[in-house]
Image: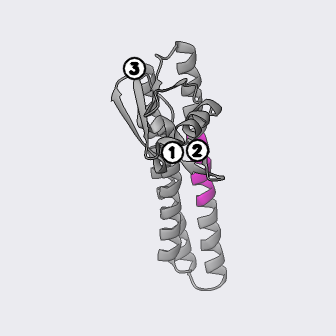
Amino acid sequence: MDADDILLDVEERMEKAIGVLKTSLAGIRTGRANPGLVDSLKVELYGSPIPIKQVATVGAPEPNQIIIRPFDPGTLKEIEKAIQASDLGFNPQNDGRVIRLNVPALSSEVRRRMVGRIHELAEEAKVAVRNIRRDGNKMADQAEKAKTLSEDTRDDIKQEIQDLTKKSESQVTGLAKAREKEILDN
C-alpha cells in the first residue's frame, strides 16, 4: 500500500465511525417527537426482520406524536408488535390505518440516563477511531518494512493519521455535546 491508499483508508473508516455515531445519536429521543426515534426498529415480516422505513412512512406531525403509516395495512399488527417488543418505551395506538405513538415529556431521571448513554456512544466512537489509527499506523510500519515507503514518509503518514484522529475525536465530542444540550434544554 502506498501513502495515499493508507491515508484514504484511515479517513474513510473514521468517517464511517462518525456516521455510526450520528445514527445512534438520532435514535436517542429528546422531549420532541422525531421520526429518527423508530429508525432502528425492525418489523418481523415474511420470516425476516425488515427496517420500519421499508414497510411504512414515519412522520411527526405534532411535537409530541409520531405517526406510522404502513404501505400495506395488513402489516399494522406486526408493526405494533415490533414497537411493543422494542425498548423504546412507547405504547402504540392502532386505529386500523395508522399507528400513533405519543412521546411523553422526559423526566430529569430519564434525561440523565440518556446523557449517560450519549457519553457511552461517544466513547465507543472514540475507541473505534483510535483502533483505526492503530491499524493505519500498523499499515504504515508494514509498508516501510516492505520497502515501499521511506522512514520519513512513514513518519509523515503517522503524523497525518494522528491529525485525522484528533479531528475525528473533536467531531465526536461536538456531536455528543450538541445532542446532550438538546436533551437537557427540551
Mark nearer the N terminus (1 vs 3): 1
Residue at 56%, 19% (x, y): give it: 110
Give the residue type that dot 3 points to: Asn
Q: Could you tell me residue 19's position as x and y percent? A: 48, 51
Residue at 62%, 53% (x, y): give it: 46
Q: Is mark 3 on a helix, strand or loop?
A: loop
Q: What element carries label 2?
A: strand
Residue at 54%, 33% (x, y): give it: 118
Residue ID for mark 1: 52
Inter-mark Cα distance, 2 to 1: 6 Å
Inter-mark Cα distance, 2 to 3: 30 Å
Q: In this view, does 75 lie to the left or right of 60?
A: right
Q: How crowded is mark 3: few (under 14 residues within 10 Å), some or many (20 or more)?
A: few
Question: Which residues are the magenta region?
Answer: 122-132
Residue ID for mark 3: 186
Instruction: From the viewer's side, name the closer residue of 102 and 143.
Output: 102
Q: In this view, does 185 lie to the left or right of 138?
A: left
Looking at the rendering, in which quadrant would you find the C terminus?
top left
Name the front one of labels 1 and 3: 1
Give the residue type that dot 2 points to: Val
Mark nearer the N terminus (2 vs 1): 2
Instruction: From the viewer's side, name the closer residue of 128 and 34.
Output: 34
Whether residue 39 appears in this view of the structure is no
Name the front one of labels 2 and 3: 2
Residue ID for mark 2: 43
Q: What element carries label 1?
A: helix
Instruction: From the viewer's side, name the closer residue of 58 and 161.
Output: 58
Q: How crowded is mark 1: few (under 14 residues within 10 Å), some or many (20 or more)?
A: many
Asked if the residues shown at circle 2 and circle 1 are in contact, with their CB atoms under 8 angstroms apart, the answer is yes
Whether residue 144 appears in this view of the structure is yes
Q: Is residue 104 left or right of residue 133?
A: left
Q: Could you tell me residue 132's position as x and y percent? A: 59, 59
